[in-house]
Image: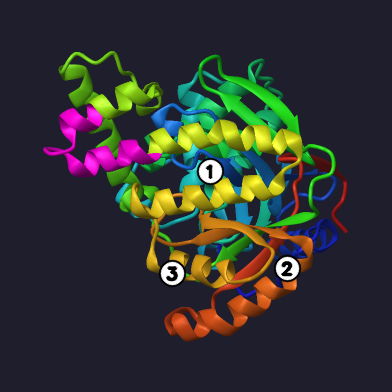
Amino acid sequence: MTGDLTPVSNDTQAFDLLGRLAREHQMDVHGGQVRRTSSRFCLGVEHGDYNGTELFGVGTDRFIWMAYKANGTDRMRLFSGNFPDEGVVEFTLGDVPNPQSPGIAERWARFPFGVNFVLRRAGYEIARGFDAVLYGNIPGGGMSRSASLTLNLILSLLDVNKIGVDEDMAIIDLAQAVENDYIGSPCGQLDQIMIYFAKEGMGTHYNPADRSIKYVSLGAGATDFRIVSLDTGTVRPGLEKSTYKLRRGQCEELVGLLKARGYDIGCLADVREETLFHKIQDEFSAEYPQLCRRLTYIYHAQNRFYEMLDAWKAGDIERVGAIFRADGIGLRDEYQISGPELETMCDLVRTVEGVLGERMLGGGDRGASGALVRADAVEGVRAAVESGYPRSRPDHAEGYATHVCKMVDGVTLFKNQLP
């Protein structure tokens, strides 16, 4: 998200800004609620969700804040401080453009349109609209701002219409459907899960076998560390226009080939045993070398996942960082989903003593890299980026940023906070 507003870094600043935006654009949200949804930081397995692996990550303190209140009509009225040029987005519930309409492909309004479309398609009686103003400080790639926005809109629209959803995973399915079916982005569910279920100070472990969530405390005695997002200042296209879509298609292609040859495989995560992995490589690598490279990353990343989880539980953050780094090398060389600016950030911070691990984040190509950093090395990381990145990537010398983050709750609701 972009805009000319003074950067917001905490709740008080966000409430002040939302109140000002509401007054400037005649949005009646005072006395309503503010829903805050976080960003996320995946520790494993990046790109594992659509390949069927288990997932682990945390919520991070870059947010979308939305102040909203029922307006007594069947109309939605929203203003985004990040996209002021679009003005107030206004529409009647149930009257939205068709899915993947060309006219909305570049508009942020496709998200509220899509939420309305998906909720009504799912049979929810959405008849009460609201006024809303929103603002976000989530970087432009790698920390899942689209998932954060979608979840915020879904939860708020359900709230205004007094609709409860019994199964938490149903919210995840709805959020994914907005991006898959309405917007046309082929995302999995990693982002939505890691934001919706995030708890302050905890890691979230998702097992797709039974769609279960477990919270995992960092073991006692862990080195004091920070999560750092390294925004490259690049503009990342939507997943529907990126290498992400190609990689997902390649993984699905390999699964299809394996099934056709008689392998009992539903997804690449089913290739767990070393003997099976090598058999597939021997049979397919000559004819399908690129597809086998994708499998190589998923196979090794899945094995590393359990080592990482054990290290987290033991408080061995140095080992967690080393596995994070190994994943980054695999994403770069085997999955081939990174990008030159992302790798420049990794190369720069890897030289700093106290950086435990680094790799690209999110969908790939552009956006942000991430690092696990000892607390006493944060300033060294900032200095390395500020010294090296503008010289290495002069085209992005104005837009890059270093975000030092902490673990937070994924969804928080505030009442009557606007000035």
Nearer the observer, 87 or 1: 1
Q: Name which residue lies at 64% across and 46% down.
A: 319
Above or below for 187 versus 216: below
Q: Does dot 3 land on a helix, a strand or a loop?
A: helix
Question: Which amino acid type is shown beneath numbered disc 3?
Answer: Glu
Instruction: Give residue 93's position: percent from left, percent from top.
Output: 53, 35
Q: Residue 285 magenta-drawn? A: yes
SS state under label 2: helix
Sequence-wise, the earlier of marks 1 and 3 is: 1
**Do callouts 1 and 2 mark residues in contact (Cβ within 8 Å)?**
no
Q: Is any atom of residue 151 visible in this view?
A: yes
Q: Which residue is mark 1?
A: 112
Q: In the rendered image, which quarter contains the N terminus?
A: bottom right
**Is 233 displayed left or right of 41 in the figure?**
left
Q: Are marks 1 and 3 in contact (CB under 8 Å)?
A: no
User: Which of the 4 image quarters holds residue 400?
Assistant: bottom right
- Taking depth in this image into account, of 365 and 312 the one nearest to the observer is 312
Q: Cα distance, mark 1 to mark 2? A: 37 Å
Residue 188 is covered by the magenta coloring: no
The image's mark for residue 353 is none
Disc 1 is placed on an element classified as helix
| Residue at which label 2 appears | 378
Our reading of the magenta stretch's main secondary structure is helix
Image position of 9 (left or right of 318): right
**Residue identifier under label 3:** 341
Q: Amino acid at mark 2?
A: Val
Crowd class of label 3 (few under 14; some 14 to 19; many from 20; radius 10 Å): many
